[in-house]
Image (spheres, helix red, strand yellow):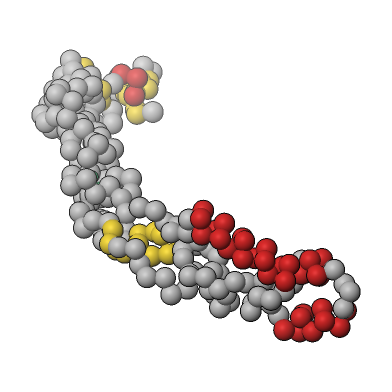
């Protein structure tokens, strides 16, 4: 849709009128006080003086960032140019209203899709392309020992070794004590945790570190 109904022919016509006004100072838009000054001056060059004056030839106001009708207000009283936008997803319909010399839609337009359970880009699909591997918002979940595929990669409890994991020794969530370590799926006493005194009277006497 064209946002500026003013044609080049219109502008040429207005330029011609303005030129005529400059040469004759007969335009109704010429400031009256300026005309008196011109009359008093008598022999002053009309064109040179006119260049210092502010001419405004009233014209039909159009959306172009110019005060066409010379009422001191730019782009005023311009009817809207139709309806626009959509009501799909987060978008809202509106009207084409004149703003800063061009017609813009007052409705809410599409935005980048983000994971929020809403159709931000108004394509009719919610959160497309922004969900994690499990089809949810947020980062991919972490795998934990529970015999389930928590991170949705097709593997269950990957990265967890039941033979050596002190927190999942032999089975998920089976923790070894602080003085133990997981050895082949069993919690065993950790010799390194104790200091044994061979000279103690009830030898062997071992104390934790
Ligand atoms: Ca979408
Ligand atoms: Ca979304
Ligand atoms: Ca798991
Ligand atoms: Ca997994």
Q: Is residue 120 above or below residue 181?
A: below
Can the viewer see residue 174 in this picture?
no
The residue drawn where x is 56% and y is 78% is 71
The residue drawn where x is 82% and y is 78% is 38
Q: Is residue 141 above or below residue 51?
A: above
Instruction: Please provide percent x and percent y for residue 105.
Output: 35, 59
Query: For this view, does 200 lie left or right of residue 17?
Result: left
Q: Which quadrant: the C terminus?
A: top left
The residue drawn where x is 73% and y is 67% is 23
Quarter of the rendering containing residue 151: top left
Instruction: Please provide percent x and percent y for residue 126.
Output: 19, 46
The residue drawn where x is 76% and y is 84% is 33
Query: For this view, does 73 lie left or right of residue 104?
Result: right
Q: Nearer the viewer, residue 77 or 104?
A: 77
Count how many numbered circles sit on residues in the image: 0
Q: Is residue 51 above or below residue 163?
A: below
Quarter of the rendering containing residue 172: top left
Q: Nearer the viewer, residue 91 or 80?
A: 80
Q: Nearer the viewer, residue 188 or 114?
A: 114
Quarter of the rendering containing residue 16: bottom right
Instruction: Please provide percent x and percent y for residue 149.
Output: 14, 29
Q: Nearer the viewer, residue 20 or 79?
A: 20
Can the viewer see residue 13 in this picture?
yes
Instruction: Please provide percent x and percent y for residue 55.
Output: 67, 71
């Amino acid at each position: 849709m064209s946002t500026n109904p003013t044609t080049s022919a219109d502008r040429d016509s207005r330029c011609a009128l303005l030129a005529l006004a400059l040469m004759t100072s007969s335009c109704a838009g010429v400031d009256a006080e300026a005309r008196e000054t011109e009359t008093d001056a008598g022999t002053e060059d009309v064109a040179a003086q006119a260049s210092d004056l502010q001419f405004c030839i009233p014209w039909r106001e159009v959306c172009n960032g110019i005060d066409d009708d010379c009422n001191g207000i730019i782009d005023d009283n311009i009817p809207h140019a139709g309806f626009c936008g959509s009501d799909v997803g987060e978008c809202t319909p509106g009207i084409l209203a004149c703003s800063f010399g061009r017609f813009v839609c007052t409705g809410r337009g599409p935005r980048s899709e983000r994971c929020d359970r809403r159709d931000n880009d108004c394509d009719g699909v919610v959160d497309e392309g922004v969900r994690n591997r499990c089809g949810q918002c947020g980062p991919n979940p972490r795998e934990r020992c529970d015999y389930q595929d928590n991170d949705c990669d097709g593997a269950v409890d990957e990265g967890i070794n039941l033979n050596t994991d002190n927190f999942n020794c032999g089975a998920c969530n089976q923790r070894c004590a602080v003085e133990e370590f997981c050895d082949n799926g069993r919690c065993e006493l950790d010799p390194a945790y104790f200091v044994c005194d061979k000279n103690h009277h009830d030898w062997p006497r071992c104390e934790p570190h």
